[in-house]
Image: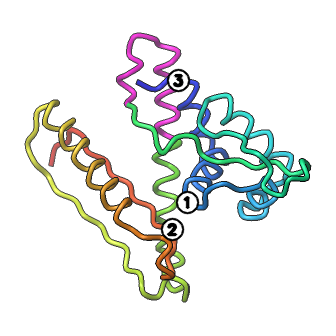
Amino acid sequence: MEDISVITAVHHPLRRRIYDYLLLYGTSKVTTLARALESQVGSISHHLRMLERAGVVERVPDHDGDGRTSWWRAERRGLSWSTDDFADSPADALLAREAQRQGIRLQFERLQRWHRNRADPAYADYDGYSSDTTAWATPEELNDLSDRLQSAVREWQASIDTDDGRDRTPVFLFTHAFPSVP
């Protein structure tokens, strides 16, 4: 189970973008992050320290060796948690529900941005997809599905040779599975 401080740290909108950038692009300096995320260097530095305190990113030695530049990388590949993990603490449960709302908002904002920008020439060869279904499941079977999907995604990520010289663009994948009625 994740500590609530980790979840709340990552689910701030700018901190989530920083974390995602570091996951995709690897070790980066603060000025690169600021430029890529269209934010001020001071703001990026502040949020990196918040993520560092949560154990999500870490400062790394200066690649240039001059000591004037701050370099960072993701310390963890991902987070897995549920609001139910915090049922025994009303305060933590409230924070977890708000982090969940932030996460869902981010997911749908990214989906909407994709639909607004699909005509962009950079995405000409990409066709995003949608998939949904309805099935019967026990709580244990739903957890098993989650584990299997996470395993399949990790296997797919590991199969991609990012050094093969082919052009790629970041891809965002999100899934939700939950009890529902027709």
The percent position of residue 47, horizontal first and vertical second, equals 73, 40
Q: Amino acid at mark 2?
A: Pro
Task: Tell me the residue at 24%/64% (across/down).
Answer: 131
Disc 2 on helix, strand or loop?
A: loop
Neighbourhood count class around disc 2 (C-alpha, 10 Å): few under 14, some 14–19, many 20 upward = few
- Which residues lie in the magenta part? 82-101
Pick the residue in front: 1 or 119: 1
Q: Residue furthest left?
A: 136
Residue under numbered circle 2: 170
Give above or below for 122 relative to 140. below
Neighbourhood count class around disc 1 (C-alpha, 10 Å): few under 14, some 14–19, many 20 upward = few
Is 93 included in the stretch rendered in magenta?
A: yes
Q: Amino acid at mark 1?
A: Leu
Disc 3 on helix, strand or loop?
A: helix
Q: Is residue 154 left or right of residue 27?
A: left
Query: Of label 1 and label 3, which has the lower sequence position?
Result: 3
Tell me, yes or no, whether the two marked residues, 2 and 1, touch with CB atoms within 8 Å: yes
Q: Which mark is residue 24?
A: 1
Task: Tell me the residue at 46%/30% (across/down).
Answer: 97
Mark 1 vs mark 3: in front: 1
